[in-house]
Amino acid sequence: MRADTKLKALGELSQFDVCGSPQAFVTHKTSPRFPFIYHSIGESNEGNSTRLFKILQTNACEHNCSYCANRKDRNFERLSFTPKELAETFMYYYEENLVEGCFISSAINKGAEASQQSVLDTIKLLRKKYKYEGYIHTKILPGVDEEMIREVAKYSDRLSINLEAPGDEWLSKISKHKKFSNILSQLQSIAKISEEKKLKSGVTTQFMVGGTDESDKTIMNLVSKLYKEFKLRRVYYSGFMPIENTPLENLSPCFPQRELRLYQADSLIRQYNFTSEELPFDSKGLLPINEDPKLAWAKQHLDLFPIEINKASFEELLRVPGFGKISADKIIEARQVNKITTLDTLKRLGAPISKARNFITLENHFFPTKSPELEAKYTDKAGAVGKLLQKQLFLWEEM
Ligand code: SF4
């Protein structure tokens, strides 16, 4: 079997492991010719992309998770790389400057330990024989012991294990052999080992979204704990896609917007100090589909707005829809020199104002979207803005 046939098949099947931004943000699509080259966009989402060689060591799985393309009962060609083959193939693409790092995962064949050993042998060859010093992200398989994880950590920059669902109630519906509590305790061990060994790129996990009836609220409550207690570097969300010849082939795919909202909510927890309890879930525990969660939260908390740009703390600025850490820093720096009195000044600082202008005042003047007459009507002589104005604006404005 030619290596490029294996590469194409095992690269395509690795697509279910996510390690970058959601599809909605992705501008560099994977080429059909090189499905194993994955453009992973960095945390900043500023367009910096790393070309990862993303591959499965084997697709021959002895388990039968009902959502998975590699499940045992699915009739398709089973392929495997030997460690030597995979290491040599990666080095070819690396030396040709077609990829900058690798992410290796595997199905489970002849037990989790044996499958993990093949992946370990591959990354050992890369580090020891080929003296490769670049980025390696290694997937830890459910069921391997701590000693194996420690060994894999020696050669990896990042480790991950997929939780897939936020608890046994949901995981047991899609996988008979995986136990949530076991995977969670493996994730905890991985996080501990990462702390001890100071893994350069830390630990991540992934949830599959929409394959069962889990709510966004259940996921985000767990995610909040994972960031706090396990110090995870990132959590990824992979929207469920039905795969032919699997028990879930007739289930509808996850709405891409749901995946996007989860990433946005994740960012509010990870970067903006929101708690999961503050997120704007509806009565079914779902995030709003039609607007970003920060804007939805602000609209539910109009009593906290508008905030005065020239006085607000860094934390208050971070709560303004549209503002991020960079905008907040720039505003604080600029107002130490001169008070900020115009939207143009904010624009020049690079602060996005299209959403923010409805939640801020500049020296007590309010500049809501396309509503000068309302501004005039509800702005008192001293320039203070009545709360009534905010409430009325939201009744008929598109934010
Ligand atoms: S163990 Fe992994 S590869 Fe195997 S069927 Fe389950 S999800 Fe798929």
Image (spheres, rainbow, N blue to C red):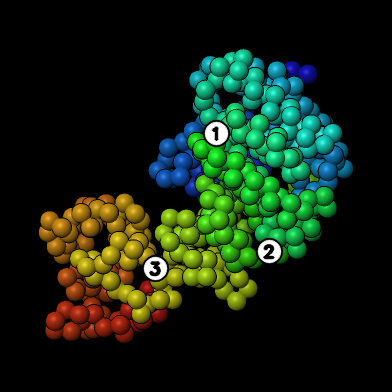
Sequence-first disc among 2 and 1: 1
User: Please, is residue 93 above or below residue 136 in the view?
Assistant: above
Q: Is residue 139 visible?
A: yes
Q: Is 226 drawn above or below residue 105 in the view shown?
A: below
The N terminus is located in which quarter? top right
Q: Which residue is mark 3?
A: 399
The residue drawn where x is 15% and y is 58% is 336
Horizontal and vertical percent position of residue 251: 75, 57
First reached walking from the N terminus: tag 3 or tag 2: 2
Residue 256's disc is: none
Residue farthest along the top direction in this orientation? 129
Is the residue at mark 1 in contact range of ligand 1, meaning its CB lies under 8 Å from it?
no
Rendered location of residue 228, percent (x, y): 52, 57
Direction from residue 52 to residue 380 in the image, left or right: left
> Residue under circle 1?
157
Which sits in the foreground, 277 or 46? 277
Disc number placed over residue 214 in the picture, else none: 2
Circle nearer the N terminus (1, 3): 1
Rounded to the nearest whole Å, what is the CA distance between mark 3 and mark 2? 29 Å
Q: Residues within 10 Å of mark 3 (few under 14, many from 20)?
A: some
Which residue shows up at 43% across the image and 61% down it? 273
What residue do we see at 70% from left, 29% from top? 119
Q: In the rendered image, is residue 53 in sight?
A: no
**10 Å neighbourhood of mark 2: few (<14), some, or many (≥20)?**
some
Mark 2: C-beta under 8 Å from nearest atom of ligand 1 = no
Horizontal placement of 389 versus 274: left or right?
left
- Residue 62 vs 37, above or below: the answer is below
Residue 170: which quarter of the image?
A: bottom right
Q: CA distance from mark 1 to mark 3?
A: 41 Å
As helix, strand or loop, the secondary structure at mark 3 comes to loop
Q: CA distance from mark 2 to mark 1?
A: 31 Å
Of the 4 image quadrants, the one containing the C terminus is bottom left
